[in-house]
């Protein structure tokens, strides 16, 4: 479903504040328990976590379970409370999109030469919960082959075993609570299949299915079979291919979005060893030299409320970057850790020359075929203004029917020719973003793994999705999953409040064009296959003018759009391959800085990225706690027998230990202000892109799916 017309109308209507709820004051109190005011930040913490997004709030919750450790999360965005109804209501992801609000960083790419010089919008969440607060809620997994391929790229690095499928599968499950469809009529109508054994049952994030569906959702699986795409009964146990209805990150108890804030922050008891601060943008990590040559972080510098004044907070043990695929490399670069050529050109002093920072950027590209239709879609019902429009079950409908298709479906007998072409071209399309031999060898390692291990496997090279949230139209999108084109995040300024430069290098490699072309041809074929075909009146985009391979290729170069799944800019790879972190997530050359977010897996996955990122953050938490010799928390999550000082709310904490024993070593509430200027905010830097965003929203939202 597209973000569509209705989103544009929402933009035009301006920002809609959340309606007050009956239990507001109690709710507000409960929701803000570990969210502290910036004036109460202590002088130092054991762990300072940069970014309170999807991964950051997992790490904050898990590390603070150990009452011996003090933990601070600094989040650039706000707490999101003014937007709560829009965040919580699943279908508002389409009808009341948060894109045109301050909750979106609203990045854009550089002009993309192989994509008709497009400057593509790159939304990213800027709020507690990060992108998990503004995204499309598809919750599915990468496959066993892909995750094991990641582990294999690590060779015999210490800790490599922790990134096997077996480890990651357990970690992903640990984050989840699965609920089957609420009633059998929904299951039948949508043709939902599932295997509870492949899902977690006690984790903080709810994974389920909407409380409303449509016959067209069920038509998806049948049309797929008729078009030669097998259905899968269970895409969650490692064989993540075929057509199916994915779970969504929705809590079926009240049809709300389940995201890192609702799962990992709101249910926690108060913990005196844990503080989460919103509106605090980290600008730099500050380092000392140590004898061994590693740099040691001693403090984190940040700016409050979009102001210019810099404050610092001390670091006793570690800094953990969880600022996402854009934010984490950006903070390293502004801190003087990164490729020398980038830092020199930006005027940032090189403290540690680490050529891989920001490299190996991979993103899923999406293109969409659209038909006019008079069939009933969720968008039709919403636009009808009937009473159903405000029914919470109806408002839980989000698109989730998907199909992952492999190379033999796309290319038939042509696969081996494609593979040998790709292997023969390994030196030809190396990204021109780095001349470092290590970075290039990392590119080749990822490329080789993709070409040798993924390309001819059953893993999907293309994901197909159907969009049913527009009135009068149906979309089928084709999304490239394993790009051979890699890009880069860099900076061109020494002011850490300036936005980074994002160059995904879209369609730099011709194989990406061919694969996407075959994918979008299959998308059209699916729309022309019964039972979907009879719902379509006419293909309106690109329409019958586009028929030959050449016509498809010309068309798709002008259509590329992000599927919102950028990854790999702080890649876990050997240092000699342009790696940024080792298998224990530690940044090379730094003794006490780790990265734990979507920037870490070195290779794109054939999946939406939430589940793997939750799993990675859970795994990171266990590794870090193990490093400090703390036993991992119990995996029993619904035990409220903790010694929390306010377990009177009767909720399960969603986590293991409460706050039975508190270490209050460093609680004095002092501001550590190293700047002479006042901390009052000037113009919020985050709002600088606002006019551009408005334009971008109008231009693009009319023709895109939200994924
Ligand atoms: C529009 C959209 C739709 C998507 N749809 C889906 C989907 O349907 N299913 C799915 O699985 N995935 C989806 N994704 C992707 C998924 O949300 C992300 O992959 C995931 O959230 C990544 O987690 P993260 O922790 O790495 O980064 P994020 O969740 O983005 O968190 C990073 C956090 O760090 C903060 N930050 C950044 N820089 C700084 C700084 N300097 N100082 C302090 N804080 C900072 C940010 O404000 C943000 O809160 C979507 C993403 C978007 C944007
Ligand atoms: C916390 O630290 C104290 C003092 O070092 C130690 O005795 C105790 O075992 C620690 N608690 C845990 C859970 O590790
Ligand atoms: C990581 O791997 C080591 C060695 O196999 C193992 O002992 C440890 O339990 C693993 N940690 C996690 C969190 O899986
Ligand atoms: C939804 O229900 C969960 C409990 O399952 C609760 O924690 C949460 O606060 C509820 N959300 C809203 C918005 O009521
Ligand atoms: C690190 O550098 C800071 C700032 O120069 C200084 O205050 C601190 O004492 C140093 N710490 C160590 C361990 O050298
Ligand atoms: C670390 O030491 C080296 C060599 O003495 C020096 O050039 C560099 O500036 C120091 N870095 C920091 C962050 O102090
Ligand atoms: C601020 O932090 C620095 C670095 O940790 C520390 O040296 C200094 O004492 C702190 N100042 C205050 C007032 O806490
Ligand atoms: C390419 O971009 C130009 C300028 O924006 C535009 O006029 C043209 O239609 C685009 N071509 C395609 C194929 O999208
Ligand atoms: C540097 O720090 C890393 C951890 O990031 C550690 O493994 C390594 O041994 C350290 N090297 C030196 C020389 O101290
Ligand atoms: C909850 O934890 C307590 C203390 O660890 C334990 O005695 C009790 O059996 C647990 N209850 C459940 C339901 O797991
Ligand atoms: C919580 O941890 C403390 C030590 O940090 C321990 O003494 C206490 O028994 C734990 N409580 C539960 C419920 O596990
Ligand atoms: C809770 O705290 C009390 C007193 O501090 C202690 O006796 C009891 O064992 C604790 N219970 C748990 C489950 O940790
Ligand atoms: C409290 O935590 C600090 C920092 O981790 C540690 O040095 C200290 O030993 C702890 N104190 C107690 C009583 O556990």
Image (cartoon, rainbow, N blue to C red):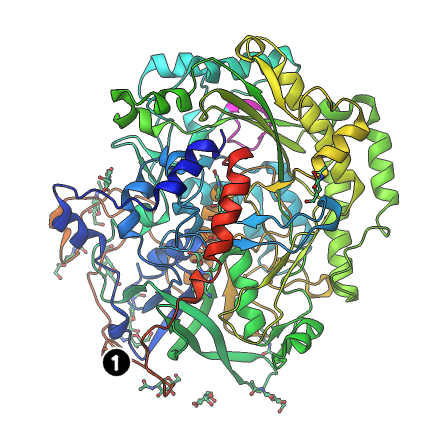
Dominant secondary structure of the residues highlighted in magenta in the image: loop
Question: Residue 217 lies in magenta, yes or no?
Answer: no
Residue depicted at 58% across the width and 71% down the height:
333
- Residue 158, above or below 134: below
Quarter holding residue 417: top right
- Can residue 484 be spotted in the picture? no
> Closer to the camera, 456 or 508?
508
- Can residue 37 be spotted in the picture? yes
Q: Is mark 1 within 8 Å of ligand 7?
A: yes
Q: Position of residue 480 (x, y in %)?
A: 65, 37
Q: Position of residue 127 (x, y in %)?
A: 37, 55
Question: Residue 236 lies in magenta, yes or no?
Answer: yes
Quarter holding residue 272: bottom left
> Closer to the camera, 141 or 119?
119
> Closer to the camera, 314 or 465?
465
> Which residues, given as a range, are shown in magenta?
235-244
From the viewer's perspective, tell me whether residue 359 is left or right of residue 43: right
From the viewer's perspective, tell me whether residue 278 is left or right of residue 575: left
Quarter holding residue 154: bottom right
Residue depicted at 38% across the width and 59% down the height:
77
């Amino acid at each position: 479903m597209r973000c569509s017309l209705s989103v544009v109308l929402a933009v035009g209507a301006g920002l809609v504040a959340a309606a007050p709820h009956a239990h507001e004051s109690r709710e507000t109190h409960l929701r803000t328990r570990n969210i502290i005011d910036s004036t109460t930040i202590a002088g130092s913490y054991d762990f300072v976590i940069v970014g309170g997004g999807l991964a950051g709030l997992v790490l904050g919750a898990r590390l603070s379970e150990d009452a011996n450790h003090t933990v601070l999360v600094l989040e650039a965005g706000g707490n999101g409370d003014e937007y709560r109804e829009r965040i919580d209501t699943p279908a508002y992801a389409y009808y009341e999109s948060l894109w045109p609000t301050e909750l979106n960083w609203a990045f854009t790419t550089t002009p993309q030469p192989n994509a008709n010089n497009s400057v593509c919008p790159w939304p990213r969440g800027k709020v507690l919960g990060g992108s998990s607060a503004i995204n499309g809620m598809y919750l599915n997994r990468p496959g066993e082959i892909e995750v094991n391929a990641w582990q294999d790229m690590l060779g015999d690095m210490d800790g490599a075993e922790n990134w096997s499928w077996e480890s990651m599968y357990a970690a992903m499950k640990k984050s989840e609570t699965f609920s089957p469809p609420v009633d059998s009529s929904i299951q039948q109508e949508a043709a939902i299949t599932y295997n509870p054994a492949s899902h977690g049952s006690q984790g903080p994030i709810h994974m389920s299915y909407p409380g409303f569906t449509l016959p067209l959702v069920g038509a998806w699986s049948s049309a797929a079979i008729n078009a030669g795409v097998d259905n899968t009964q269970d895409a969650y146990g490692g064989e993540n291919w075929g057509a199916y209805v994915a779970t969504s990150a929705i809590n079926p108890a009240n049809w709300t979005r389940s995201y890192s804030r609702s799962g990992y922050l709101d249910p926690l008891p108060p913990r005196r060893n844990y503080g989460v601060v919103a509106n605090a943008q980290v600008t730099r990590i500050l380092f000392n030299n140590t004898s061994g040559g590693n740099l040691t972080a001693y403090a984190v510098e940040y700016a409050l409320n979009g102001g210019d004044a810099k404050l610092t907070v001390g670091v006793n043990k570690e800094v953990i970057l969880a600022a996402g695929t854009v934010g984490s490399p950006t903070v390293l670069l502004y801190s003087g850790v990164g490729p020398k050529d980038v830092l020199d050109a930006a005027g940032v002093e090189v403290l540690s020359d680490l050529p891989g920072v920001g490299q190996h950027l991979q993103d899923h590209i999406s293109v969409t075929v659209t038909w006019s239709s008079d069939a009933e879609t969720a968008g039709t019902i919403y636009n009808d203004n009937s009473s159903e429009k405000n029914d919470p079950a109806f408002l839980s409908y989000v698109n989730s029917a998907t199909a992952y298709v492999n190379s033999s479906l796309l290319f038939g007998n042509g696969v081996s020719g494609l593979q040998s072409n790709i292997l023969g071209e390994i030196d030809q399309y190396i990204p021109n973003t780095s001349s470092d031999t290590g970075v290039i060898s990392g590119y080749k390692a990822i490329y080789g793994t993709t070409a040798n291990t993924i390309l001819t496997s059953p893993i999907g090279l293309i994901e197909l999705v159907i969009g049913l949230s527009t009135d009068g139209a149906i979309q089928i999108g084709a999304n490239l999953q394993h790009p051979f084109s890699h890009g880069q995040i860099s900076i061109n300024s020494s002011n850490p409040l300036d936005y980074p430069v994002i160059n995904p290098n879209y369609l730099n490699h011709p194989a990406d064009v061919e694969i996407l072309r075959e994918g979008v041809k299959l998308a059209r074929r699916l729309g022309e296959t019964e039972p979907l075909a009879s719902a379509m009146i006419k293909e309106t985009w690109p329409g019958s003018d586009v028929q030959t391979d050449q016509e498809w290729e010309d068309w798709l170069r002008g259509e590329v759009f992000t599927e919102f799944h950028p990854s790999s800019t702080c890649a876990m790879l050997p240092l000699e391959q342009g790696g940024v972190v080792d298998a224990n997530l530690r940044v090379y050359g730094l003794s006490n800085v780790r990265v734990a977010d979507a920037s870490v897996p070195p290779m794109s996955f054939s999946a939406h990225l939430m589940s793997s990122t939750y799993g990675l953050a859970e795994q990171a938490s266990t590794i870090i706690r193990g490093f400090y010799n703390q036993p991992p928390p119990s995996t029993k999550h619904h035990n409220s027998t903790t010694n929390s000082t306010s377990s009177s709310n009767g909720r399960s904490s969603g986590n293991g230990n409460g706050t039975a024993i508190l270490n209050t070593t460093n609680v004095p509430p002092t501001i550590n202000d190293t700047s002479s200027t006042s901390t009052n905010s000037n113009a919020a830097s985050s709002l600088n892109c606002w006019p551009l965003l408005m334009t971008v929203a109008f231009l693009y939202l009319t023709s895109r799916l939200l994924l």
